[in-house]
């Protein structure tokens, strides 16, 4: 079923006319209401009036994650706080999280777009949705929740964690659909099996998985472990949250982008040059209907490819391929976005350790793990005749990382000068995950 038949199947020409009309409005609005955009446009020598066609967008400057950080927390909002009804923040940052705001109309749009996603997965009001995305500042939980309610489905707001209880509820309530990260889906399958539950016999028919990278191989694994159809959903807080794009049940190849609300470009991440549709590059989004937090040419750092060919489901919105990587060093650890520089920031604040570290990321029993290996200082090392000193230090680092970044890391202190030194760019991360 297509939730919003009119908008999701607009002929390209009509869609582009609508996009241009909306884009002109947004460019005007940010120029006159957000100081950052006024300065950025002036600096780039462009005015809102210079935008006459969709193609003119490429004359406008990009917005980057750094711009969001510099305007933390509310500097890029285009409406006063009295018009904002909801705030979210992207996970795990040291007080410089990305904070996003929504007006009531933004929430309505988001709910509709998530309802479209559920409908694209073949769900209706007769379905029951087990929503295991985390509720809270993270956009996943509430985003999916409002979408499920908008569709009229019955939603179980189970949130993340407490896996045994989740398995009991899956058995007792009999939901027909599940939303969570793909790695958590595998974890549920495994723990269920360990509890002696036949996870293939549950009522689950479809799973909507996203918020972290995954592969076709992982899709097959999840489908066979849980006996359901696994679909991919993509989004990011900056642009809205989950629901920016979603795979359809009929096509199951690439995610339809809600192009009546977001303009998408792919660029060469090194030069910023716009690539022809179909070529692999970094995704750049412009929001064309958002009120509270509009972004022009936001560089996602996500690498993918647009699929302009028509889809058998009848939707005319272009699709994007699954995310193939990132053009920066962001790691996603159990759904939490983490930059190595954030871990470094925690480490340099601690006396007795050196700024030499290595991060080893792995996936064990379908759960991401991260080990921080860090050198201790000569003084601490030679004073550490008592193992206790080192143990306390380890515990403190674990706690600080948890407090600041929200992730549970394993910490291993190593001897001074034992880690590899780099001549050029340091490669501090070993990602051993096979996904
Ligand atoms: P979310 O709540 O959607 O995880 P965040 O802003 O915390 O939002 O993280 C967004 C990032 O998560 C994206 O930029 C992308 O790197 C990653 N992501 C989200 N969905 C997917 C997906 N389906 N496949 C791969 N990566 C994804
Ligand atoms: Zn389709």
Image: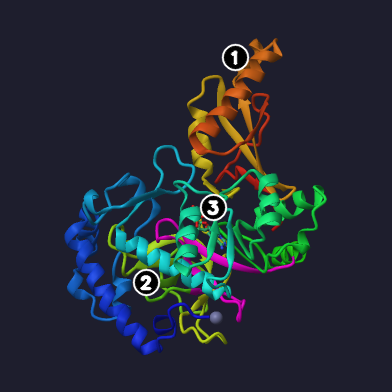
Report x, y in % for residue 189: 74, 55
Which mark, residue 157? 3
Characterize the local packing of mark 3: few (<14), some (14-19) or many (20 or more) Cα atoms within 10 angstroms.
Answer: some
Q: Is residue 366 magenta?
A: no
Q: Is residue 248 magenta?
A: yes
From the image, state whether disc 2 or disc 3 is nearer to you: 3
Q: Which residue is mark 1?
A: 379
Cα–Cα gap, marks 2 and 1: 58 Å
Colour mapping used in the image: rainbow
Mark nearer the N terminus (1 vs 3): 3
Cα–Cα gap, marks 1 and 3: 51 Å
- In this picture, is 40 found above or below 19? above
Q: Quadrant of the C terminus?
A: bottom right
Characterize the local packing of mark 2: few (<14), some (14-19) or many (20 or more) Cα atoms within 10 angstroms.
Answer: many
For label 2, the SS is loop
For label 1, the SS is helix
**Residue range (magenta):** 227-256
| Ligand 1 has an atom within 8 Å of the beta carbon of the residue at disc 2 | no
Report x, y in % for residue 216: 69, 68
Characterize the local packing of mark 1: few (<14), some (14-19) or many (20 or more) Cα atoms within 10 angstroms.
Answer: few
- In this picture, is 312 found above or below 323? below
Q: What residue is at 36 percent from the left and 64 percent from the top?
A: 108
Cα–Cα gap, marks 2 and 3: 27 Å
Mark nearer the N terminus (2 vs 1): 2
Which mark, residue 261? 2
Instruction: Report if the CB atoms under discs 1 and 3 are less than 8 Å apart.
Output: no
């Amino acid at each position: 079923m297509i939730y919003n038949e009119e908008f999701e199947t607009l002929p390209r020409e009509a869609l582009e006319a609508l996009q241009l009309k909306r884009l002109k409005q947004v460019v005007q609005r940010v120029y006159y209401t957000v100081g950052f955009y006024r300065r950025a446009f002036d600096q780039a020598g462009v005015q809102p009036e210079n935008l006459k066609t969709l193609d003119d967008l490429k004359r406008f400057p990009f917005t980057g994650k750094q711009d969001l950080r510099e305007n933390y927390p509310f500097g890029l909002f285009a409406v006063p706080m009295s018009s904002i009804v909801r705030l979210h923040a992207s996970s795990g940052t040291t007080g410089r999280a990305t904070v996003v705001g929504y007006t009531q109309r933004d929430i309505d749009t988001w709910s509709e777009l998530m309802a479209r996603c559920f409908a694209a997965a073949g769900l209706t009001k007769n379905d029951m949705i087990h929503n295991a995305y985390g509720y809270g500042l993270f956009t996943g939980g509430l985003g999916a929740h409002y979408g499920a309610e908008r569709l009229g489905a019955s939603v179980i707001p189970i949130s993340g964690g407490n896996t045994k209880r989740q398995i009991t509820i899956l058995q007792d309530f009999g939901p027909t659909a599940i939303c969570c990260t793909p790695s958590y889906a595998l974890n549920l399958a495994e723990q269920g099996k360990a509890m002696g539950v036949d996870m293939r016999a549950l009522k689950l028919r479809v799973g909507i998985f996203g918020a972290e990278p995954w592969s076709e191989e992982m899709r097959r694994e999840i489908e066979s472990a849980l006996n359901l159809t696994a679909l991919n959903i993509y989004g990011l807080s900056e642009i809205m949250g989950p629901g920016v794009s979603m795979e359809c049940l009929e096509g199951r190849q690439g995610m339809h982008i809600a192009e009546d609300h977001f303009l998408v470009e792919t660029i060469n991440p090194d030069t910023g040059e716009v690539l022809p549709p179909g070529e692999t590059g970094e995704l750049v989004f412009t929001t064309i209907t958002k009120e509270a937090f509009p972004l022009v040419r936001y560089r996602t750092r996500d690498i993918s490819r647009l699929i302009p060919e028509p889809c058998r489901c009848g939707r005319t919105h272009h699709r994007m391929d699954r995310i193939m990587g990132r053009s920066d060093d962001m790691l996603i650890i159990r759904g939490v976005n983490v930059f190595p520089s954030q871990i470094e920031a925690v480490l340099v604040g601690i006396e007795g350790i050196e700024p030499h570290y290595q991060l080893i990321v792995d996936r064990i029993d379908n759960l991401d793990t991260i080990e921080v290996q860090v050198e201790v200082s000569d003084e601490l090392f030679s004073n550490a005749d008592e193992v206790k000193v080192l143990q306390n230090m380890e515990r403190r680092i674990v706690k600080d990382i948890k407090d600041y970044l929200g992730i549970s890391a394993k910490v291993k202190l190593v001897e001074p000068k034992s880690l590899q030194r780099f001549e050029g760019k340091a490669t501090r991360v070993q990602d051993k995950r096979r996904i």
